[in-house]
Amino acid sequence: MRYIWLACCMVVLLVVFGLLDIYIQNKRIRKSRLELMRAKRIAENSIRNKSVFLSNMSHEIRTPLNALSGFSEVLAMPDMDDETLEQCNELIQLNSDLLLKLVNDVVDISCLDINNMKFQIQSYDVIEICRNVVKTVSSIKKTEADIIFESPLDSLIAQTDKDRLQQLLINLLVNATKFTKEGSITLKVEKTKGNGKLFFSVTDTGCGIAPEKQEKLFQRFEKLNEEAVGFGLGLCICQLIVKRFGGKIWIDTEYTDGARFIFTHTI
């Protein structure tokens, strides 16, 4: 009788261990399937990201190229006065530097890693930078909207990277032109008291951004409108640049007459 019980116990143990082994094997199979599905999604996303990255980089580079083409045509016009020639030369130089910076940074920006993005922090007049950016975007805009610069300051020296700040402002302004057919797009700069920060804002009177889409604004390769260029790589880059400046960037959810982006910059 004892042997029968021992045999039954052995059979039960073997069945339990067998079921346990089957459970473990099934668990491993499920884990492998999940890993394969995850790898497949990563591969598909990588292919999509490469395509969108190339599309958005063409958007980034097109802005200074259009400016260079436009101002070069102006220089070829006869009877140009010295002041106009000097302004054109300055804007051509500005956009040439910006284009060179973009080309040099294609690989770094594709990584979307702030540690790979090179910055040269020096003392610059941010008011002058803003005025030059507004001139540049105004010269190449494809909209009836007016591009305006407002600031209570005539001049303000801050520690910044001139090229990166230009890139950031041009991104925001050009994005605004894509969604603002008429009305105005206003770049504004203010200095806060006591905490050593600058507040930049880009406000437009365009179609605005739906509340349910606002949370995705700064995700990499996200586009709010698949038919429009922009809002893919540009805003993610903006966020990286702002972080390097020691600030934050967000959309003003209380503004309902279009869209308003705000970012801070330490002085």
Image: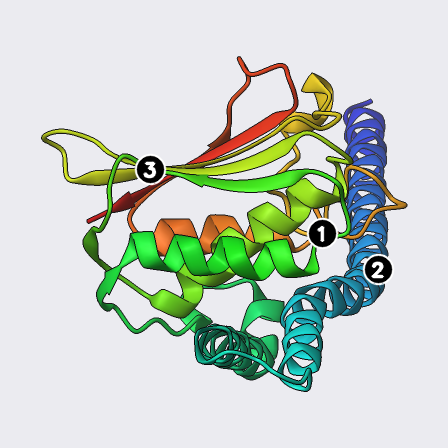
N-term mark: 1 or 2: 2
Q: As shown in the figure, which amino acid type bears the numbered disc 3?
A: Ser
The span from disc 1 to disc 2 (Cα, nearest Å) is: 9 Å
Element under label 1?
loop
Q: Is residue 186 left or right of residue 1?
A: left
N-term mark: 2 or 3: 2
Q: Nearer the viewer, mark 1 or mark 2?
A: 1
Measured from the top left, where is residue 180 in percent x and y?
73, 35
Q: In percent of the image, x 77 and y 69: which residue is there?
A: 54
| Residue 72 image label | none
Element under label 3?
loop
Element under label 2?
helix
Residue behind mark 1: 221
Q: Residue furthest front?
A: 79
Location of residue 212 (image quadrant): top right
Q: Nearer the viewer, residue 102 or 212?
A: 102
Q: In percent of the image, x 61 and y 77: which residue is there?
A: 106
Q: Is residue 16 left or right of residue 249?
A: right
The span from disc 3 to disc 1 (Cα, nearest Å) is: 32 Å
Measured from the top left, where is residue 80 in percent x and y?
57, 80
